[in-house]
Amino acid sequence: MRYCLALLCVLAAQGPVTVGSTRAEWSKPDVSWSPSRPIQGTIVQFTLRPDRLGSWSNIVAVEGVLEDQPLHFERAHDGHFHALAGIPIYAQDSIAVELTLWRAAGAREHLTRYVPVERGTFSVAQLRVDPRYVEPPDSALALRIVAERDSVRRVVQRSHSTPRIWGDRFVLPRDSRVTSGFGQRREFNGEYRSTHMGLDLAGHVGAPVAATNRGVVVLVSDFYYSGKLVYLDHGQGLLTAYLHLSETFVAVGDTVGRGEPIGRVGASGRVTGPHLHWTARYGAVIVNPRSLLELDVSFLTGGS
Ligand SMILES: [Zn+2]
């Protein structure tokens, strides 16, 4: 859901406004993001830097919201505040980020910025399938699918309350060919069916799958569509998942390191053949996992 609170839109037009204080001399903090025009369905990094007048020093905390998801700003060794966010694949033209700066005296300052969003290039796959494969599931199966989605929703919500435990760059879960890209539009028998919200990597049954960064195992299960799967919580809303496995090596609660084997490629769930489906999310926003590989982690301190 995109939203723009009318009050905050007005504030954005007028520039920063102080709340709870009569002091008006605070100057505009520098809010930037990288990349400067993020593509639909990718991760973006926000940075707040000191302003020229030095009023920065009395900011003790920064909060933010983008697409209903809280942002987790951390103060880095350089004194700047940094946070990640997810740009939804359906974002059009621009998306609002709402920021709250907390001053030392308890005063707040609200800011709204509009992040320009670059249109992504997504392929279309036209598939001819036997009509019985596109029939809706019966009621028992529908209940199972709803319960499985709920269990994902729970681990996603919890991730906003867990600390970041990674501090190095993300890596691929396996070094192999991409067989189906993120955002691919799938049409069955000429009708739109779904959008592919992950990245498919080639692999034969039994080929190794590794954790793409340090994380805590929060879900190991066998889902109707996704097959055997592992979800890793990297903290502060960031999760990765590994689907259609033939075997899993980890249990809920385990902490795994970057590059550590967590399972094997398989063809479990509803698939046409063995491969790894790798997906990433910032909270409820599913993003292209490739965008994690490009994150600049130089500002991170003490994450691992
Ligand atoms: Zn896939």
Image: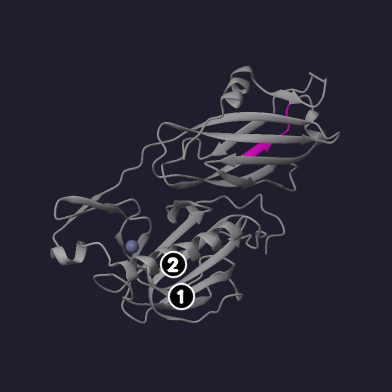
Q: Quadrant of ligand 1?
A: bottom left
**What number of labels is visible?**
2
Q: Position of residue 200 (x, y in %)?
A: 34, 63
Q: Which range is magenta?
A: 47-51
Callout 2 amino acid:
Glu
Foreground of the two, 122 or 222: 222
User: What quarter of the picture does the C terminus occupy?
Assistant: bottom right
Judge depth for marks 2 and 1 and give the one in front.
2
Which residue is disc 2 drawn over? 148
Q: Main secondary structure of the magenta part?
A: strand
Mark closest to the chain's N terminus, 2 or 1 = 2
Q: Position of residue 112 (x, y in %)?
A: 60, 29
Callout 1 amino acid:
Ser
Residue occupying image coordinates x 75% and y 24%:
18
Which circle marks residue 221 in the picture?
1
Magenta segment: does it hold 295?
no
Measured along the vertical axis of the image, is residue 272 above or below residue 154? below
SS type, badge 2: helix
Q: Are marks 2 and 1 in contact (CB under 8 Å)?
A: yes
SS type, badge 1: strand
